[in-house]
Amino acid sequence: MSSPAADPRPPGAVRSRVPRIAEAAVERARLTVVPRAQAVRAARLPFVVLISVLMLGGVVGLLMFNTSMQQTSFTTTTLEGRAATLLAREQELTAELEELRDPQRLATAARAQGMRTPVAPAFLLPDGTVRGEAVPTPEEDGERITAKAPPLPGILAPPPPPPPAEDRTGDRDRTRSGDTGAGNRDRERRDDRKTRNDQNRR
Amino acid sequence: MRRTPQQRPRGSTRGSPQVRLRIGFVLIAMVLSVFGARLVQLQGIDPNSYAPMALAEGLREVVLPAERGDILDRNGEPLATSVEGSMIIADPALTAEDAPELAKLLANRLGVDYFKVLERLRAEGSRFEYVARQVPAARAETVVDVARERGFDGLTVRRDPVRTYPGGDVAANLVGFLGTPDPEEGDQPLAGLELAFDAQLSGTDGSARYQVGAGNRLPLADSTKVDAVDGADLTTTIDRDLQWYTQRVLRQTVEDSRADSGFAVVLDSRTGDLLAVADHPTFDANAPAEAPKGDRISRAMTDVYEPGSVQKVLTLGALIDAGKVTPRTRITVPPVLNRQDSPIGDWFDHGTIRLTLAGVLAKSSNIGTVLAADQFADGELRDYLTRFGLGRRTGIGVLGESPGILPSGSLWTSQTEDRIAFGQALSVNAVQMAAAVNTIANGGVRVDPSLIEGSATMNDGSVVGTEQARTERVLSERAARQTAAMMERVVDPEAGVAPGAAVPGYRVAGKTGTAQAVGEECACYDGSFDVSFAGFAPADDPRFTVYVVVKNPGNGGGGGSVAGPAFAKLMSFTLRRYGVPPTGAEPSKLPVEW
């Protein structure tokens, strides 16, 4: 930093003639007594307190954290149990609702109130005209929505009608009635009868 | 060894301290070396056997069960759904003592059989007995809690999912059912869509491992979790309410005609969606074990039969499309037609009558059909029938579907062709035939029938569903319209044979069928008949195709009198349900005679 040329020479320097070799080093090497340092020892108490507080805080914090996590775990277990119970309950109720929405139950309830399936749909248009044929629905129910009762065991059943032997013969004269369809005529009963040749046998 | 001599001086003096110290050191060294050896054994030789044992203490491993997907109808109504359920298990070692009281409680609360439960609660030498299975979870918990409160020990609850079918028998033959779940292997699909789409429905179970202390999860301990992948829902094209109605009408028809069985199919003409596929006899999917095994399949898909006169619709439609005839083509029908091997007759006695082609269909004349079909070139009819979809599976996703038989090659002789023209000597399944008739309803374009909405993958990897449905033109639009007009004459009270199939106010096109059936025992025509009716409405703008088949009616009825009225009910209900008004056009007046 100090260059010899720029350095102001101390006035009246006695050793001006002394060659200025290593003047800076000489200056530096000049020994002086170190002034006795003031006894500025930091107060020990605050530090100890600080560390203690930190440690204590850490330990207590960790403990509380752990405790709260345990607590959360307890809560989780309880809530999971409740969720499972509620889910089961919900599903049970949904199933109950589905049972109530079952078409069979609805149809039975509707019939109990006197409702019937109409014979043919008819549409009432906004302008008051009716589209389709309005056919009165018969008093008697068109559909039987419950299965027919199984036949009574032999001992309870009335004597059976004469066996319809001609039914199974494949004979052309199947003229028995008892069809479900209304308005059928004799010829329908043997609708589409096929060839009677024996060659069709497999 | 050294101790014995050292003990002798003990009585007089305690001996020199050095000696005692040395002995003490030796003893300590011996003990420590035992410890050391044990340490080397634990840490060095078999460290792996103890670490897992330590870990296993308090480690809990649970399966996170995947929820099975629902099977839904087209409106999202469940046909099959899963409910969380539980099994109640007893440990007889703990329950035997108060067995009568506990059994009484369980019988009252769960509706289980008192004596059976009592026996199980007292079973000797057993520590695991089922008390009840597939109980709704909420009820199982309550019962076990009540038992615990009253001081009964030894009951535990485990997961046991319940599959319920809210409709009971509605679509049961299609949907199928699950067997009692196996605690190890889970669901046991046994039939129907449940089985065919099990891979999609069942999903993948997950698992979780964590450590517990006092019943609670340890928050900072190791834990891993693999989430369960729930099964995907399967949406069908079935309309639940319509399916229900179809099944009821079919049951009534089958019962009243004292028939063996029957099926009914309702198709959306434009899309090919199967709105209802009914089978009778059927079963309650919630209690499948109560029904005979043969009733738990879908007969409409697995049973093949000869379609009979319904087939004439396809034959005559193809003839018109080929340009060989028109609905007004005049045909002279003799009383009997003698062919190479056998005479062919009609179902009604007549002399020589003069029918138009429309009349042949309306009166369902076999002779007229065979005469008209003579104009087919070789192989032409078979080609048409193949394109109508006969002889191959519809592939709608039902297991065990039978493709039916369409004779080929050397089996297709001119005699066979004669019989095939009016619906014998070939066999079909109900959905196949409904789709074939629907081709005419859909303006000559055959659309693949579908049971699955969208797209779904079966267990065997094939993808089915409405998205996969293809369309193919079989007849020209004009030929299809003319065939429909001829079919309208079938339900005409004057001209046709099936006035019972008419829906008041609507133009209905249809065709009866009465076919000789092959008996199971003799494998020949045994005199039994299958009667059927296929048709669509409104005839001039078809929206729905309905096909009803009744097998072996015991009352001697035919297609027009047995299946016709059932058809009319189903068609009327479907038209009303979907709000399809009559078109208001005049019905076909094609002449039937000349």
Image (cartoon, coloured by chain):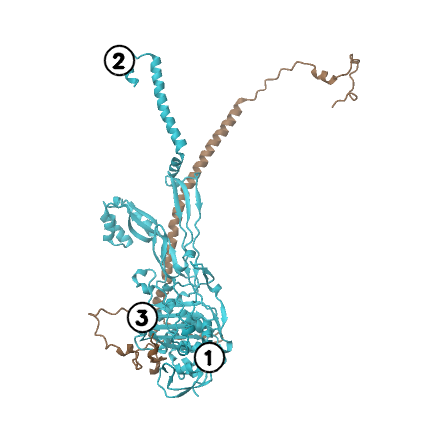
Q: Position of residue B35 (x, y in %)?
A: 37, 26
**Residue A160 or residue A90, whichever sits in front:** A160
The chain letter under disc 2 is B
Question: What is the display colour for chain A?
Answer: brown
Q: Which residue is most to the front?
A: B410
Residue receiving disc 2:
B11
Q: Position of residue B201 (x, y in %)?
A: 42, 56
* Three-letter code, disc 2: Gly
Q: Answer with left or right where residue A163 lies relative to residue B225.
A: left
Q: Is residue B496 visible?
A: no
Q: Are marks 1 and 3 on the same chain?
A: yes
Q: Position of residue A91 (x, y in %)?
A: 38, 55
Q: Position of residue B393 (x, y in %)?
A: 42, 67
Sequence-first disc among 2 and 1: 2
Question: Residue B520: which numbered mark, if any?
Answer: 3
Q: Are marks 1 and 3 in contact (CB under 8 Å)?
A: no
Sequence-first disc among 2 and 3: 2
